[in-house]
Amino acid sequence: MKMKSPRLLAAGFLALALVATAAADTLARFNGHWQIDLAKSTPIRPWNEARLDIKADADSAQIVRHLRWGLERKVDDTTNVKTDGHTVTANPVGYWLDTWYTNVYIGGDHQKQVTGEWLDGGRVLKVESRLALEAQQGDHPVHIYEEYRLSPDGNTLTVFALRSTRDQAMTYVFHRISKFDEPAGMVTTASGLRYAITRQGTGPLAKPGQILTVHYTGTLVDGTQFDSSRSRQTPYIFTLGRRQVIPGWDEGFALLHVGDQAVLIVPPELAYGKTARGPIPANSPLKFEVELLEAK
Amino acid sequence: MKTFSTRLLSALGALVLAAVLAPSLHAVPGHPGPAPKEAYLVPVKDNWEITGALPENLMLIGLQGLANTDAPRVYVEYPETWHFHDFNPLKDFYATRYGIKFTRLDTPDVALTALGKFAKGYVVWDRKVRPSINVALTAAGVLRAVVVDESLIPLAEKHGLKKLADFRGQFTGQTDIQIYRWAYDKYWKDCSRDYLIWMGGAAGNVMEPGVADLGIAFGAFVTDLSANPKDKEEFAFHKELLAQMKPTAWIMGWHSYAKDTEGQWVTLTSSYGLKVIGLNTFPNGTFMSQIGFSPDFKFTNSNHVTRQSVVKPENKVYLCLVQSDSMGIGAWTQPERGQIPYNWEVGVDGAQWYPAAMEMFTKDKTPNDFFIGGQSGYMYPSAVPADRFPGLMKEMNERMVPMDQHTVTIMDHSDRGIPIGYFDLPKRVVDQYYAGAPDVIGFINGYAAAHTFDVRNGQAFISYDYYLDEHRPQADVVADLDELMRLNPVRPYYLLLHVRESNSIKRVIDIVNALPEKPEVMPLDTFLKLAGTKPTFKVRYKDERPSGQSWDVQTQ
């Protein structure tokens, strides 16, 4: 048998390497944080927020599902899966999270057996789970088939799910997160400031000209905390409406009552604009978790 | 626009009517008696802001409390948008069914002309300090005074009322705990130990004091102290008040949404074995609770079986539809009512606190309408001390008799910190119900779905298998119910369904008709009897629920 030339072999290896790199690049596009689009998804109530954090490579994937219900309840559900299409990975499960409508709980040994596989050149992640659900009459085996499909632009993740006990398919659409983690009930003002009061105080509304004593923690969109009065254990004091602070603060604190805790999302034009400032890059929107302690 | 002479005539008419009404003392709130021949009608405005119409509205509701302390003399006409809007037709029902002739007191001036004699003076609250309203309401009950803000002082004095207390400036800069502690030191010794008023609900510039008339009539302490353990001082003071109440006391009103949660508040109240009558917006309590059923009316239920009946379950799905929220926020008046068996949750306290409303709603029941009851008000049995439970069960049994009720509904929210399954009950609570209510046909439990199930001596204890959310699309609901039938393959399968809020009866009928496996829709008493005869469910309690240690659970 005639030996292939070293040049051909090299070319072959290069081609394989290029394909592998392309596949790896495709898989890497699953990585990141994903926010559910409730309008395009099967209802998830009582949960009013769902996020996915995905870390994937050629051999495995980790899918962390964050569900939140108001301010009171949140749960994180982690699934680790080998993606060779064969290996069965056992994952512990405590609650059946998909609904509170039905009397269905996790049953059996409180484990789910999961297999994963990359399909279509890494554009689709298939995850199959087997577990026991406990209903009124006892345990019942259930097989769940899910496909995580990435859009061509890499910004939309659609999860199709089928359960052996249910005729209706479920669809969940997620968008890549490139913005702050925001509480429910955010309000946008005419200037573009976004805010939500996360705990109501009982004091009076802050007024321009008053000296405010506040606590705050500021973060960038990537989660970097750039400043915090709480970390310094020293409240910050300024006069409201006198341009002693960024415009987003003058506007935002004028919306608060003493005792209020709130989240302010300040667009760059109401913060530092095109100017970089210390750890804050130019054109950065800023998130502040604030508390109005006193107004004199 | 009314002329001066019209107002004068109205005022004179009111004076004459006051003279007629004055001697007819026969009752106190919470003790229904015969209806009066005449009563006053006092309208309030559709604005509940401290800086809006609240001062005037509050004065009128307080005046109602003073006037109604020993007889039902005054009915406040709330705006159409008021929270208990299903009570709106009640005034007309009193007029037509009970023959009460109402005289309208259109303005605060006219109202004070007619009713000012029930007050010994006035107390002034501070518009800049919201909790001073609650202190003023407490003082008003103790001192028998009308509550006014600064702007209404001239009106009160015009009617010869003297200032008995003035809280303007007194609490400036003080915390709620400091204010309420002052009120406690000053008035608590003279306040009722049978009633406490929680004037919570809306916060900030808004107050909706529908229950203020009861507070004043009872001489109750009025507050909105927090039930959140994080608010250490308020929480401790809150407990101090509850500990001093009589075992049979009622907590009337609602918690402050700005301070704590419903779960925290009711759990704390229940931990003292006390019952809650909600809400702070509950209207006309002093009027409704002094007028019983009309003479020729007897409250009866559409009972189908008794505790001793024998039934024969078949191999099918039995579906039972329970509509909570009293009459279901409008569902009762829908034309489809009566087409399928429907079970309506009506409080056992209705006969005490709003008999006429009960009569108005239920006088035209159909054979397919079945009423189910339960313990008084909001009470979470898991939180109730064991030594208080038998007394509460005795009271429940006694209250079910005039309501002709033979099934018990339970809802426990005390463990809401966990994400799923917090409506389940531990075995000790289930044991207490079986011990305390041996004669009822059975029990149902939950709000959302739950999996506490039991059966003893033919009495089934069943939790909701499904929660019908008014917002959930019909196709999803049908898929949910079909999935439940597949997860529970043995027949008979007992599917208890909680119909919530504004779900229409037509929507429910459409859902039932769309199910692939047709269930038989049953009234609750028969449903429980069938389940008690041939149970196919697994007996479970909360104690067996997985701990969920792997979840990051945050509670408020």
Image (tube, coloured by chain):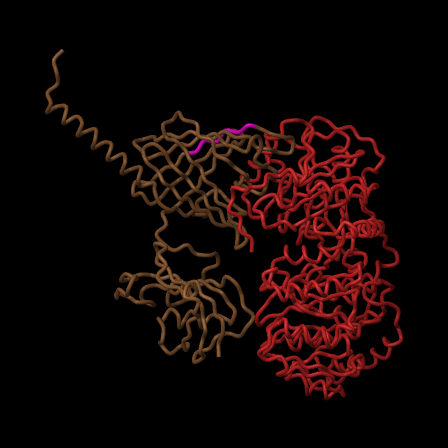
| Residue B217 higher or lower than B345, as above or below | below
Asked whether B506 or A129 is in front, the reply is A129
Q: Please state the horizontal and vertical placement of residue A60, each as a whole percent of the image.
A: 36, 33
Residue B507 visible in the snapshot: no
- Residue A144 is inside the magenta segment: yes
Q: Is residue B335 left or right of residue B458?
A: left
Quarter assignment of residue B104: bottom right
Q: Please state the horizontal and vertical placement of residue B2, each as a whole percent of the image.
A: 68, 81
Asked whether B422 or A213 is in front, the reply is A213
Question: Which chain can be seen in brown?
Answer: A
Q: Please state the horizontal and vertical placement of residue A13, each as a whole percent of the image.
A: 18, 27
Quarter containing the N terminus of chain A: top left
* Residue plotted at (53% across, 29% down): A142
Quarter assignment of residue B240: bottom right
* Residue plotted at (66% across, 32% down): B519
| Residue A38 higher or lower than A195, as above or below | above
Q: Main secondary structure of the magenta part?
A: strand
Q: Residue furthest top?
A: A1
Q: Colour of chain B?
A: red
Q: Is residue B160 left or right of residue A110?
A: right
Q: How many marks?
A: 0
Q: Which residues are magenta?
A: A141-146
- Residue B286 is inside the magenta segment: no
* Residue plotted at (57% across, 78% down): B173
Residue B478 visible in the snapshot: yes
Q: Please state the horizontal and vertical placement of residue B487, each as a whole percent of the image.
A: 59, 30
Quarter assignment of residue A232: bottom left
Asked whether A169 or B92 is in front, the reply is A169
Q: Is residue B8 left or right of residue B439?
A: left
* Residue plotted at (86% across, 77% down): B22
